[in-house]
Amino acid sequence: MSYLSAGKILKVNLTDRTITTEPTARYEGKFIGGKSIAAKLLYDEVVPGTDALAPGNALVFAAGALSGTPCPGSGRTYVTAKSPLSGYLGSSNVSGFWGPELKFAGYDQLVVKGKADKPVYIAIDNDRVEIRDADGIWGKNVTDAQTAIRKELNDQDTQLLCIGPAGEKLIRYAIVAHGIMSAAARTGLGAVMGSKNLKAIAVRGRGDLKLADPKKFLELCKVDRDAIMAQPFAVDMAEIGVTKAQDAFNADGQQGIFNYQKGNSPGNAAQEAFAKQYSKKSMACFSCPMGCRQYYTLPGLPAEGMKCALYSPLYTANVFDPMLNYEAASLCQEGGVDVVYISGVIGWLMELSQRGIITEKDTDGIVLQWGEAQGAIQIIKKIIAREGIGDVLAESHMAFAKKVGKGAEDYFIASKGLPINYIDLRGTKGNALAGAISTKGDFMSIAPLLDMMEPVIEMYQGEEREGMQAWLDDFATQVTGTPKAGAPREYEGKAASVKYYEDVVNLADTMGVCRWQGDQAMMPMTIDALAELYSAGKGMAMTGEGLLEAAQRGHAVERAFAAREGLTRDDDTLPKRFMQEPLPEGRYKGEMVDTAKLEEMKTEYYTLRGWDPATGAPSQETFEKLGLGDMAESLKKETKEGKTKGKNVK
Amino acid sequence: MAKVLMLNYEKCTGCRTCELVCSVEHEGAVNPAKSRIKSVKWETEGLFVPTGCQQCVDAPCMAVCPVKAISRDEELNMNRLNHEVCIGCRMCVAACPFGAMNFNVDTKRVFKCDLCHGEPQCAQFCQAKAVEYVEATTQSEVKRRSAAEKLTAAIQKGAALTAGAAQ
């Protein structure tokens, strides 16, 4: 009897239309679940040097170890493949309901390989797994496609992951969307799905997910949920999402406006007011006590469930009107492209235009001017339609940079080909290190909160502020050995800080639990709380350290995957702007990242991780310590193959 | 007077926790398909409607049952299903106007909400208070006040607009 997991991994090969299963138990002991098992499946399934858009690439969809249970925030699904954008690791974590439904259907993970001979979608209903023609659905935007599939399957409760026209057209930053509020948005996973002629994956489950000690499990869940809702942060999240925090970044000079040439725009912090005025209600993911999405229906625009990045895709272009940002976000969401990538491209094109590197001749006559939304919106439409300039931009910024020359690529504010997630990294050195070393190229998903506490503490006065500062110093020391880890401008302690946050994020992704309810956000779903739940559900004594080690195994395998595809220490870097131009204004005025000190932080970080500082890949000793001795040999052998075959788009 | 489950679609966030805790409480496993309560959702419309057994006073399930397996529990103000008597004919499933009478394909038994014997888990876990366990007499009072609050807010907004226009 297997508790807590569904027990099977489902494998679909679209080329020969074979459908097989294998026991999850094969991976569970070492990797526990979610992201960690997914990383190993990806490593094993993809031959080094495979083109990301070739049938040989694997798409892995993973429910977490606690997914599907009443554990708060247990609705996360981890999606991974080789990235068509960076050529290294593609991964993104999607909220909502899909992973839990997969487990009710009887599967912990789904691996899709091959390429269908025509557009199809996969429909899973417990043991019945079908590959169905997507004739009438191909070409539809994400909401219409999901509605059509639900109608075709005659099941309103089926959960869907699907691509929009962008994924079908292999736009290298296409998303895998879920419902109207979620997406595995980063690293181009939607293009991988499109390359397989796979429009959607529908899943419906009606089976039991067994718990070893149901009574105790429920009791623990109740305690955890109440603890979460006792946090003021959680109450805010339910009412206005993260709009308040995003307004604070803006007012504080950490918002990458004018394509990160400036930092702030006082008076333009309008998101909270927008949410309060227009949000119809709060929407929650599976088993979430907070519900941090806001539901909007605005005249003439599609209904969306909005959070985070969706509020501000045009900020890089200095457009702050929430209505225009909503319009741009819903265009991206419905067409199926990553809003963060779009925001990076728009800001970049505006700066190229400002510097005279490009003119209207390069942009099909579209006028690009700071603060003007219309040009930006036209670019987004051209990209999704793959028309003219959009066809070039769809292949990534480098394709366009090569076309225009004049050093255009230097102004693209990105890491490993992925635009930075709106927030300027120059002032906060932990965030900067996270941006450099992130395996997929995204600082935000592993952002060390220790770097962001300064503005929070300043909101308090007198004794209260002193008390909070003392607590922060203690906490920073406990995590990293030095209180300086809590001081954003310092370099000291940041390697340990980044490692800690990366660990807790990897753990959350392994368990399938929302990062924002655990240690990354200093919330109650701590390492130990997760271990307690896992123990009660699984019927075994599991410690926090035990879970962390499994998450570290997954992370090492993920890093090895990227290394095998050619990732080196040199790829762990930041946009030149962050290292050459001081921030001109705001809280961190005058700050930039010292190149030599970044290298020192990197070396310290690799050493803490047990990775070879010369290559940035896990060392043989580390693999052995993690009980993955066989990985070391295969990595050494296959890295060469990966490099020589290398069809990577960089 | 006994309590009733008060379901409020305006407050429901669609998280489905009620379905999870209900199935764990009754089945010892998580399985929304075996939950007595369900958040029926139209996500695009932002509509999430918690539905379950209304514990009807003149209950179709009770009326249609050929072996009188369903009886009124006046103490808990609900309709109780006796599995010792039930023959599994599923007439109650057919008769229930709310889809609240269900059939478990594994155990071959019908099942319905039993208010967790007076401590409904769905209400205890619902953070949004879309499911509450309240005195039957107060149910309308709460709704009446909530409706009146909305009207008051509208009147105040209207007054503010009028004042603004007058200036």
Image (spheres, coloured by chain):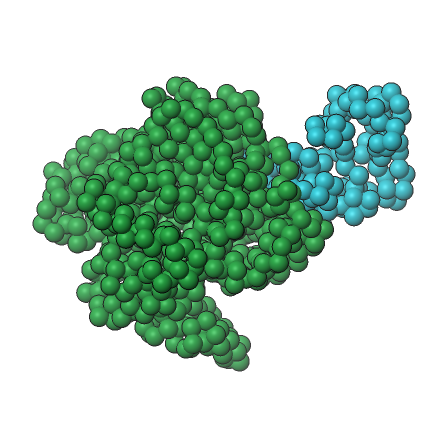
Q: Nearer the viewer, residue A12 or A508?
A: A12
From the image, which quarter does the N terminus of chain A lie in? top right
Q: Which chain is green?
A: A
Q: Nearer the viewer, residue B113 or A245?
A: B113
Q: Residue at x 69, y 48 (%)?
A: A214
Image coords of residue A237 (percent x, y): 52, 54
Q: Residue at x 49, y 36 (%)?
A: A22
Q: Quick check: A294 left or right of A414?
A: right
Q: Residue at x 43, y 59 (%)?
A: A626
Asked if residue A391 shows in the view, the reply is: yes
Asked if residue A458 shows in the view, the reply is: no
Q: Quick check: A622 left or right of A360?
A: right
Q: Nearer the viewer, residue A637 or A363?
A: A637
Q: Nearer the viewer, residue B165 or A312?
A: A312
Image coords of residue A281 (percent x, y): 55, 44
Image coords of residue A201 (percent x, y): 45, 31
Placement of A458 over or under B26, stated as above or below: below
Q: Residue at x 28, y 33 (%)?
A: A54
Q: Which chain is cyan?
A: B
Image coords of residue A93 (percent x, y): 43, 46
Disc tally is 0
Judged from this view, the residue extending furthest toward the left is A406
Q: Quadrant of residue A543?
A: bottom right
